[in-house]
Image: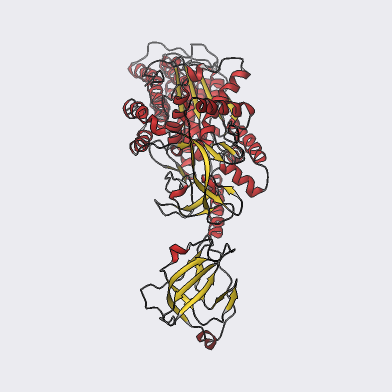
């Protein structure tokens, strides 16, 4: 290892925190939030409260193939697509309260220059390998096909609409060559293999570094799901990975005579973190390099599990090969969030969209933050349900946190005109309550620093539970006349817990924390202030109390469930097979005129100057028939030779492209429109009649 060695657990001068760049081809949904942006925001807000120098980076990934597919489907330029969704998502994040220091975009000139410069440096240093190989090519559209332009059957789970880089059903990472029955998303045709030239980063050369850095130094530091996936990749043997693609949308390859080639999106997209940092530095008239090149900077990537290999293997290999950058200290990836026991799917509209939520639940950003953190898929896939959303709001935020704060402030207003009473000669219970209160900052902070956000949130609620129980048990409203000094102590103690909550809730519930601070009439405080026994001095004037949370009624939840029900019904309709309408009835005697027999394909060959036709010879048991069939786009001659099929043998002969075709194959179609042979359940002799 070099100076880029993993830094040990020690204090850092600064923190660079990145969150995965969302594709600018659609809105943000709760799966994105729970997996990446809510935990990242909690972490960053905590670091700021600790007084750390932290830079929080994100932006739109605008060069992905999904963007070009969407643009093609809508018949517009990709730039129009990214402009729409960059603006929408940037505003959604701002309104939701995700506290990025910069929300950049990879279509900007500064990003193109940054990515090009890094590629060129690797190229000039001889760190890239040039290779010519075969890649899928769509003959009809005269275009090489990027991974996402190819779909087929997953070799792992047999899902029939897997992409060339990943199966969205089982999550397996794939290559186009692994797909069964591949077809082009542009034409629907079976693609052919054609030679092309690309540049690769030789990951195999960095395998010793990864074994040391990840398998040894990070074994007990990274989350098990992250470490396990990296271990599997490394022990399977790392292979060179292409960093260029044949496309016309993206960062152009900065080498002469490379027209039609761009940097592969998973080379260019993570570099977006660096270009965003440069943009932030220019806007703030400061130096960007310490945030990426100083060994005393801690780099943390927040991502979903589908991006682990890119952020733990490929991007670090690029940084390591370049030679001047630090490597990530941690990559706390989450698993996936489901919705109402079904996988979130943008194509099926099975999602809770952030911009829609903000419209339908105004001023309830923190409720969604709370629920998504409480149900965060930190170690395994988890589920979001609207009933759980309602229950957590009503039974936890409202009944515990909000109820405690409201009762405390209302009683203080009623008995002491909103003035913090004296805390004098506390009894054992009061001393114990204050002592417990001062321990929460340390426990919550430790959980956050170890990326255990659900655990941290539970500790925050335990502080609210502590106050709620103490207030209920102490009952100051009953003794404020008979034992006024103890009543003062009780409410002073509860007010100190409210003040601690206003500090410690800020990473999780920033809007609530701000509202609570306003009611308490206090300025923002640092994290460690919550370790003090008295955050509010005697005689401090409070503002009038307001409700922190509102009840979510059944009707609101029912409306959301109704929307999902409609989406499900629409998907059922869309997924119904495209069945041809029933033809008019025929008489039985007409049907008996058809002679349908079992047969075997003896030989098949392509017909000259025809993309669709195959010349097929079949043994019908009676004779050898020649049939011209329009299935060449779906089947090669080799894969159907020897196949047992069903044939109509007494069809009047027809001349097709100079071939006398005197029979017809009996075929159906699958859900994607591909012809499927009709076969028999058991083996039959050729010539067996179908009756």
- Image coordinates for residue 200, horizontal then vertical, percent: 47, 35
Is residue 443 rendered to the left or right of residue 628? left
Please name the residue shown 58% across and 21% down the image.
278
- Image coordinates for residue 105, horizontal then vertical, percent: 60, 31
Residue 384 appears in the rendering: no
- Image coordinates for residue 641, horizontal then vertical, percent: 43, 67
Vertical arrangement, residue 607 with respect to residue 126, above or below: below
Most extreme residue toward the bottom, as rendered? 589
Quarter of the picture containing the C terminus is bottom left
Choose between 407 and 254: the one closer to the eye.
Answer: 254
Quarter of the picture containing the N terminus is top left
- Report the number of numbered marks: 0
Choose between 617 and 325: the one closer to the eye.
Answer: 617
Choose between 647 and 364: the one closer to the eye.
Answer: 647
Choose between 232 and 509: the one closer to the eye.
Answer: 232
Vertical arrangement, residue 211 with respect to residue 12, above or below: below
Answer with the quarter of the image where residue 250 lies: top right
């Amino acid at each position: 290892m070099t100076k880029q060695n993993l830094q040990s657990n020690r204090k850092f001068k600064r923190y660079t925190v990145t969150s995965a760049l969302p594709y600018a081809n659609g809105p943000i949904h709760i799966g994105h939030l729970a997996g990446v942006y809510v935990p990242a925001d909690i972490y960053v807000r905590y670091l700021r409260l600790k007084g750390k120098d932290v830079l929080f980076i994100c932006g739109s990934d605008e060069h992905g193939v999904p963007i070009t597919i969407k643009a093609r489907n809508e018949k517009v330029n990709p730039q129009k697509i990214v402009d729409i969704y960059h603006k929408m998502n940037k505003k959604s994040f701002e309104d939701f309260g995700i506290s990025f220091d910069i929300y950049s975009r990879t279509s900007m000139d500064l990003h193109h220059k940054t990515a090009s410069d890094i590629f060129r440096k690797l190229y000039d240093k001889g760190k890239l390998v040039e290779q010519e190989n075969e890649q899928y090519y769509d003959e009809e559209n005269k275009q090489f096909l990027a991974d996402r332009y190819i779909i087929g059957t997953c070799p792992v789970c047999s899902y029939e609409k897997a992409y060339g880089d990943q199966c969205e059903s089982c999550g397996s990472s794939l290559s186009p060559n692994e797909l069964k029955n591949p077809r082009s998303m542009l034409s629907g045709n079976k693609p052919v293999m054609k030679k092309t030239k690309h540049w690769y980063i030789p990951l195999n050369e960095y395998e010793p570094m990864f074994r040391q850095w990840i398998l040894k130094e990070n074994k007990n530091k990274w989350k098990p799901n992250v470490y396990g996936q990296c271990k599997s990749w490394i022990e399977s043997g790392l292979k060179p990975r292409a960093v260029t693609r044949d496309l016309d949308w993206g960062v152009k390859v900065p080498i002469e005579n490379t027209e039609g080639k761009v940097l592969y999106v998973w080379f260019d997209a993570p570099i977006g973190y660096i270009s965003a940092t440069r943009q932030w530095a220019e806007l703030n008239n400061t130096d960007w390099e310490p945030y990426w090149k100083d060994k005393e900077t801690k780099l943390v990537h927040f991502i979903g599990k589908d991006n682990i290999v890119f952020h733990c293997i490929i991007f670090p290999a690029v940084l390591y090969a370049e030679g001047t950058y630090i490597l990530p200290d941690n990559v706390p990836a989450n698993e996936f969030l489901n919705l109402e026991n079904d996988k979130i799917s943008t194509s099926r509209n099975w999602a809770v969209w952030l911009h829609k939520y903000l419209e339908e639940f105004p001023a309830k950003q923190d409720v969604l933050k709370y629920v998504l953190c409480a149900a965060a898929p930190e170690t395994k896939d988890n589920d979001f349900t609207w009933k759980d959303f309602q229950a957590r709001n009503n039974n936890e935020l409202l009944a515990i946190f909000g109820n405690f704060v409201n009762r405390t402030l209302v009683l203080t207003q009623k008995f002491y005109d909103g003035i913090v009473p004296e805390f004098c000669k506390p009894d054992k219970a009061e001393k114990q309550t204050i002592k417990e209160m001062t321990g929460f900052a340390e426990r919550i902070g430790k959980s956050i620093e170890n990326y255990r956000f659900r655990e941290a949130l539970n500790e925050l609620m335990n502080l609210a539970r502590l106050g709620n129980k103490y207030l209920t048990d102490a009952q100051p409203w009953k003794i404020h006349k008979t034992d006024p000094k103890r009543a003062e102590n009780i409410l002073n103690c509860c007010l100190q817990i409210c003040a601690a909550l206003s500090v410690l809730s800020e990473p999780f519930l920033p809007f609530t924390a701000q509202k609570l601070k306003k009611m308490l009439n206090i300025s923002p405080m640092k994290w460690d202030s919550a370790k003090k026994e008295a955050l509010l001095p005697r005689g401090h004037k409070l503002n009038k109390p307001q409700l922190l949370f509102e009840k979510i009624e059944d009707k609101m939840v029912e409306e959301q469930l109704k929307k999902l029900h409609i989406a499900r019904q629409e998907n059922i309709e869309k997924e119904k097979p495209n069945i041809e309408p029933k033809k008019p009835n025929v008489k039985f005697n007409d049907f008996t005129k058809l002679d349908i027999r079992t047969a075997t394909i003896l030989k098949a060959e392509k017909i000259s100057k025809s993309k669709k036709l195959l010349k097929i010879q079949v043994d019908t048991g009676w004779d050898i028939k020649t049939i011209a069939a329009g299935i060449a786009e779906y089947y090669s001659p080799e894969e159907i030779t020897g196949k047992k099929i069903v044939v109509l043998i007494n069809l009047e002969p027809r001349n097709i492209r100079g071939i006398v075709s005197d029979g017809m194959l009996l075929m159906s179609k699958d859900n994607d429109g591909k012809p499927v042979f009709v076969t028999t359940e058991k083996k039959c002799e050729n010539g067996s009649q179908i009756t």
